[in-house]
Amino acid sequence: MTDPELPINLLEYEPLAAQRLSQMAYDYYASGATDELTLRDNRAAFERRKIRFRVLAGVGERSSRGQVLGAPFEFPVLIAPMAFQGLAHADAELATARAAGAAGTVMVLSTLSNVALEEVVAAGPAPVWFQLYVYKDREATAALVRRAEGAGCQALVLTVDAPLLGRRERDVRNRFHLPGGLQAKNLHAAGYGQLAPVASDSGLAAYVGSLLDPNLSWEDLAWLRSITKLPVLVKGVVRGDDAERALAAGAAGIVVSNHGGRQLDTSVATLDCLEEVASAVAGQVPVLLDGGVRRGTDVLKALALGAQAVLLGRPILWGLGSRGQAGVEHVLELLRVEFDQALALSGCSSLSEVTRDLIA
């Protein structure tokens, strides 16, 4: 039976978390760039798509298991990279990693985590991929890559849609910064762990502007591949031609993403460009999608349009902020049950049966 005290879907977790988080933390997690049109459109894109379900398909036995780049999952939802999870809960990224292990999925860990990557990898059985920002200080970047590889991370996820930070007006208003006791722990040794308030802007915008490299090019993907044995996925692609360039540069996977609507407002919703990217990739490497996923039917629609799996972002933070590890586990379980129902009601018994003809 469902506990009447618990949310019954992912959407109900956000207001619960909002009651428990500081205004600055809630706004940091929830906000998008400028007018937040892309933030809302990521969600609306799923609502626009309709499912042409099959009937009499014999769906009494179903499986949603699969794998991506050798990492197994119980259902095709991975945890997206999200910075500064210590703003949500004292256990921060450790709680998220343990919940990923309990759910049988992959955690993508942000460069800007509040817990050192070695501790997160050691926290549980979940495969961990490391999301990478490239700093102007290339030795600091290379040191991060060496640490991720040495700690047992199974892939790198290079974020390419943030040459500078999108203007997030809620963060500007709140003068976003990390409270005392929280640091970007992976950068502490390089001297880049502090994120202090600034007089008239977001502290994160100032941090990114001063430290991250805005001059990245496709040649830098080749450089990154030259210093690691790990597969490198490229995150932040919304065009087929950029997907082709990523493949030519040796990308092991593509993440269709607009940074959760937090970078360039009025940019295309991720679901709206997924099919173009998947067509360009043509099955050569895995294609993943993030942005706007809230329901099991969203996962089904993304798979039908060419994704091998989706990345789940903000609902993880709402679960973490409201109930810690138990909240993250519950968020993932709610979505797993919804996806299993979506499989059955659309006439599918396995992921291989989720095909393009399901989408009107």
Image: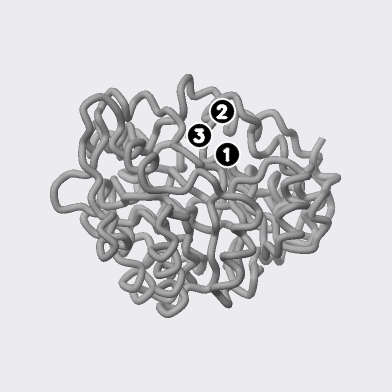
Q: Helix, strand or loop at disc 1? A: loop
**Which one is earlier in the sequence, the residue at label 1 or at label 2?**
2
Closer to the camera in the image, 212 or 242: 212
- The reply to whether callout 2 and callout 3 are in contact (CB within 8 Å) is no
Q: Is residue 346 above or below residue 40?
A: below
Amino acid type, mark 3: Gln
Is residue 221 visible to us here?
yes
Q: Position of residue 69 (x, y in %)?
A: 64, 70
Q: Helix, strand or loop at disc 3? A: loop
- The reply to whether callout 1 and callout 2 are in contact (CB within 8 Å) is yes
Q: Where's the C terminus, which quadrant?
A: top right
Alpha carbon separation for disc pair 2 and 3: 9 Å
* Residue at the image position 77 percent from the left and 54 percent from the top: 354
Closer to the camera in the image, 171 or 214: 214
Circle 3 residue: 263
Q: Is residue 60 above or below residue 235?
A: below
Alpha carbon separation for disc pair 1 and 2: 8 Å
* Residue at the image position 50 percent from the left and 34 percent from the top: 263
Alpha carbon separation for disc pair 1 and 3: 7 Å
* Residue at the image position 24 percent from the left and 52 percent from the top: 89
- The reply to whether callout 1 and callout 3 are in contact (CB within 8 Å) is yes
Crowding near pointer 1: few (<14 within 10 Å), some, many (20+)?
many
Is residue 350 visible to us here?
no
Closer to the camera in the image, 124 or 173: 173
Circle 2 residue: 38
Amino acid type, mark 2: Thr
Circle 1 residue: 258
Closer to the camera in the image, 265 or 221: 221
**Which one is earlier in the sequence, the residue at label 1 or at label 3?**
1
Identify the mark at residue 191; answer none if there is no mark: none
Q: Helix, strand or loop at disc 2? A: helix
